[in-house]
């Protein structure tokens, strides 16, 4: 694969010499000179090379992507040779961004037409059109009669367009494919879905199609380039990388608002938080604040409105708000009518929001890439400095953010995770391909394997998917699951079955699952309230959680209801905001472990070590105090030492300080809980966060040191995790998502919507049937386990970490009288989203006082 990081920076005159004369004159009058992304990429596209452009927001990468295509289109427009076909396809995950792009293209095109008019040059109109799920049928008919020269679309709509007998004819000579927001697509099934659509689009091309990918901060760029370019004849296609992320200056610092985080009350911290926010907002023109949850976003907006008054208008922007409300906020931001916008994750992507000069993050963004992406929204132009302030109110957050900020300044990024051969997405595309034409298995497999996520797909796996889609299992027909394709195993060919398949495909394509709130009902039938489905799927039988100020134990579930019993005086094992929290990346977790080692070995020189960290005085003093107390009370866990702390009292707590991020910890904790439960014949509860997990056993069940060591055995780890997942909420709900994507359960049949409750009831029946008759290797079951273990959890890095135990990492087991400073947050499940929860503060303060008294008595 040809990968030239930062390719060649061409000079302005060389680029201008290749541009259409009218485009060149327009560009010189409007911009004068090219930005770095444009210097690296425009000529490469002219030379017919695939290009990945990675650069900050506001660096001109969108114009860089379109420049070559516009030049070619204008050459034809001046000659009067523009045909009625699509020359450029632009794909973005955001409908809002699609509308931005259309405006951003139509404005320069109108200026170019005016310029041509003044020069008395006759020019054909270049048509630009948007085709998404919101496009009405009359507009689609117009596009059929007169196809746009530039088509702006989403991953889902592109997949449908490829199956349209008439419209797909207009897509046979696409010269440029531009994919925006690649960083937001590569890591999920929407991106996988798109990668297959791109290869299907490639298959119908009659000429060369140049691929141009646009991405914000992402790593490793080589892998993203492979994802963009795909494979041809078993080898990676060539792709140039224009990496100009290093051009942008950033200014990051970490702020701790109080001198002692343990001693401060919730009121003091809350008051100091909003005072600090108000001061920073007043000193800035426009401020963008990111929280980590939607509920925290609403609370911050509520408090800021009270403090700031009318002169500083504040608004919220998150995914739970309606599209109209979000659009209104974006427009007001662009017009400069808002001083502050508070968001969870919805403004991370490249929606044009105008000028922002300060970004504040409340709590850790959990990944270096995400921090740079969020902070990159400030100082929109390339030469301006992006200013970011990270406000922390928790010791673990403090260490995490200090390390994160230093790594971000040094541009050491996290690696992305691209899903490996998801079979449910493949099911959809096989049906889509069958609608297009009849295929031989080898031909279809060749096209599928060109998509990067499917490069390792085996013929056996592909044939298993074909058998399922062809309805080869009579047991499924009894449950109204019918074949969508025909598959002849003698000739090894397949095609579509019947006329109904096309509408079924059109109405059910896509990868985003339907999610609704889940009702919480007591066992005697009283309705208590609702929780999000993402929260419900993390529940394990016996888990305790808080809802409407009361404490409940999870018993079982049915359809979209979970059955509970009220319990008093029991500590929650799952915090109420847990589902919304972003997980810490594995790479950043390992860097925090290294920092812990450095501090452990050189605590007396801690001030010297912390000089290189962008943290304020309060933060530095709090970090040193935290490490000092942990070292005196217990042992500091780090990159070479895994500490297990035993707290054996009315219930037995075993703290595993595995700082590997919540996704990997979830895989390890579930497996260990399963192994202990099996060995001790008891129900084992566990709680986990990014820094580790706790196994909680009944009073009469204790673990010997040798039994703890045995838990780290890697043999059968995957099988034990699968067994641990049986009969869990996450298996039930993820199976429904996968079954819907696999077209086993139809969300929409001939325009009739199936409710999520009905989908879940069907899914529960099918899950039992498939496990009983076909086992875990049936494609839809296999994909459910893969999605849970690889995408929702992180079995790869869990195994990586466990493989080092006993070799690079020693296990040290120690007994403690109270939870240690590093274990306090795990004990009270303290990842609360930094804005509320007075009780937690009180518990922390009381426990910390016990630790200090113990240290004083034993010093």
Image (tube, rainbow, N blue to C red):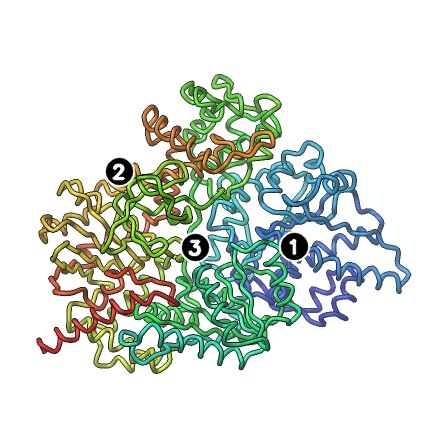
Label 3 vs 2, first from the N-terminus: 3
Q: Residues within 10 Å of mark 1 (few under 14, many from 20)?
A: few
Give the side of residue 134 with respect to residue 76, left or right: left
Q: Quadrant of residue 28?
A: bottom right
Q: Residues within 10 Å of mark 3 (few under 14, many from 20)?
A: some
Residue placed farthest to the top in the image? 490
Instruction: Please tell me whether mark 3 or mark 2 is closer to you in this view.
Output: 2
Instruction: Please tell me whether mark 1 or mark 3 is closer to you in this view.
Output: 3
| Residue 748 vertical placement versus 107 (above, below) | above
Q: In the structure shown, which secondary structural element does the residue marked by tag 1 occupy? A: loop
Asked whether residue 834 is in view, the answer is: yes
**Marker disc for residue 47:** 1
* Pointer 1 with pointer 3, Cβ within 8 A: no
Q: Position of residue 487 (x, y in %)?
A: 51, 21
From the viewer's side, name the closer residue of 142 and 417.
Answer: 142
Mark 2 highlights which residue?
723
| Disc 1 from disc 2: Cα separation | 54 Å
Instruction: Please tell me whether mark 1 or mark 2 is closer to you in this view.
Output: 2
| Disc 1 from disc 3: Cα separation | 29 Å
């Amino acid at each position: 694969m040809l990968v030239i990081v930062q390719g060649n920076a061409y000079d302005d005159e060389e680029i201008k010499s290749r541009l259409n004369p009218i485009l060149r004159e327009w560009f010189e009058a409007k911009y004068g000179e090219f930005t770095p992304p444009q210097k690296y990429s425009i000529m490469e596209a002219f030379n017919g090379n695939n290009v990945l452009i990675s650069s900050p927001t506001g660096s001109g990468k969108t114009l860089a992507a379109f420049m070559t295509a516009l030049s070619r289109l204008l050459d034809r427009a001046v000659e009067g040779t523009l045909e009625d076909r699509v020359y450029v396809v632009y794909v973005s995950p955001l409908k809002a961004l699609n509308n931005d792009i259309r405006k951003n293209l139509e404005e320069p095109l109108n200026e170019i037409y005016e310029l041509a008019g003044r020069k008395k040059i006759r020019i054909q109109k270049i048509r630009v059109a948007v085709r998404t799920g919101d496009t009405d049928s009359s507009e689609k008919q117009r596009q059929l009669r007169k196809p746009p020269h530039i088509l702006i679309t989403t991953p889902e709509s592109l997949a449908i367009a490829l199956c349209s007998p008439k419209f797909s004819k207009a897509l046979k000579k696409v010269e440029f494919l531009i994919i925006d927001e690649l960083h937001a697509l590569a890591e999920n099934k929407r991106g996988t879905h798109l990668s297959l659509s791109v290869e299907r689009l490639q298959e119908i091309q009659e000429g060369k199609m140049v691929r141009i990918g646009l991405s914000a901060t992402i790593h490793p760029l080589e892998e993203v380039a492979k994802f963009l370019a795909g494979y041809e004849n078993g080898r990676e296609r060539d792709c140039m990388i224009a990496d100009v992320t290093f051009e942008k200056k950033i200014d990051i610092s970490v702020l701790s608002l109080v001198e002692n985080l343990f001693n401060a009350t919730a009121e003091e911290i809350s008051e100091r938080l909003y005072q600090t926010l108000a001061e920073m907002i007043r000193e800035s023109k426009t401020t963008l604040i990111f929280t980590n949850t939607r509920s925290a976003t609403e609370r911050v907006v509520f408090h800021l409105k009270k403090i700031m008054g009318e002169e500083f208008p504040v608004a919220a922007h998150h995914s739970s708000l309606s599209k109209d409300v979000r659009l209104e906020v974006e427009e007001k931001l662009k017009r400069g009518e808002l001083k502050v916008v508070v968001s969870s994750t919805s403004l991370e992507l490249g929606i044009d929001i105008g000028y922002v000069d300060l970004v504040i993050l409340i709590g850790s963004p959990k990944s270096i890439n995400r921090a740079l992406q969020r902070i990159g929204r400030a100082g929109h132009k390339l030469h301006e400095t992006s200013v970011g302030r990270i406000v922390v109110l928790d010791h673990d957050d403090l260490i995490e953010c200090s390390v994160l900020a230093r790594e971000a300044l040094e541009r050491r990024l996290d690696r992305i995770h691209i899903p490996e051969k998801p079979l449910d997405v493949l099911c959809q595309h096989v049906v889509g391909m069958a609608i297009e034409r009849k295929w031989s298995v080898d031909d279809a497999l060749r096209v599928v394997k060109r998509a990067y996520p499917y490069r390792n797909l085996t013929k056996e796996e592909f044939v298993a998917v074909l058998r399922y889609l062809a309805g080869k299992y009579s047991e499924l027909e009894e449950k109204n699951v019918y074949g969508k394709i025909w598959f002849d195993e003698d000739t090894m060919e397949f095609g579509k079955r019947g006329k109904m398949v096309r509408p079924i495909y059109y109405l059910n394509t896509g990868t985003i699952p339907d999610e609704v709130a889940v009702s919480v009902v007591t066992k005697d039938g009283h309705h208590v309230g609702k929780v999000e489905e993402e929260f419900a799927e993390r529940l394990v039988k016996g888990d305790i959680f808080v809802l409407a100020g009361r404490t409940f134990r999870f018993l079982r579930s049915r359809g979209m209801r979970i059955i509970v019993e009220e319990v008093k005086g029991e500590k929650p094992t799952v915090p109420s905001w847990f589902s919304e929290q972003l997980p810490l990346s594995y790479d950043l977790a390992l860097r925090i472990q290294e920092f812990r080692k450095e501090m452990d070995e050189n605590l007396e020189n801690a001030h010297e070590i912390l000089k290189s960290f962008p943290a304020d005085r309060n933060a530095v003093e709090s970090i040193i105090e935290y490490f000092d107390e942990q070292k005196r009370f217990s042992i500091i866990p780090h990159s070479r030492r895994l500490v297990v702390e035993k707290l054996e009292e009315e219930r037995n707590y075993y703290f595993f300080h595995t700082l590997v991020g919540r996704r990997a910890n979830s895989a390890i904790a579930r497996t260990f809980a399963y192994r202990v439960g099996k060995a001790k014949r008891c129900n084992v509860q566990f709680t986990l966060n990014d820094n580790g997990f706790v196994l909680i056993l009944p009073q009469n069940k204790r673990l010997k040191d040798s039994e703890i060591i045995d838990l780290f055995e890697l043999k059968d780890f995957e099988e034990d995790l699968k067994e641990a997942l049986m009969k869990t909420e996450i298996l039930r709900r993820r199976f429904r998502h996968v079954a819907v994507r696999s077209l086993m359960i139809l969300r929409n049949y001939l325009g009739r919507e199936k409710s999520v409750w009905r989908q879940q009831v069907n899914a529960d029946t099918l899950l039992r049937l498939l496990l009983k008759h076909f086992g875990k290797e049936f494609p839809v079951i296999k994909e459910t386990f893969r999605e849970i273990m690889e995408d929702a959890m992180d079995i790869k890095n869990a195994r990586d970490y466990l493989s080092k135990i006993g070799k690079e990492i020693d296990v040290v087991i120690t007994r403690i009288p109270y939870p240690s400073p590093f274990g306090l947050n795990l004990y009270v499940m303290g990842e609360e989203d930094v804005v509320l929860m007075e009780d937690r503060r009180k518990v922390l303060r009381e426990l910390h006082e016990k630790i200090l008294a113990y240290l004083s008595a034993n010093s």
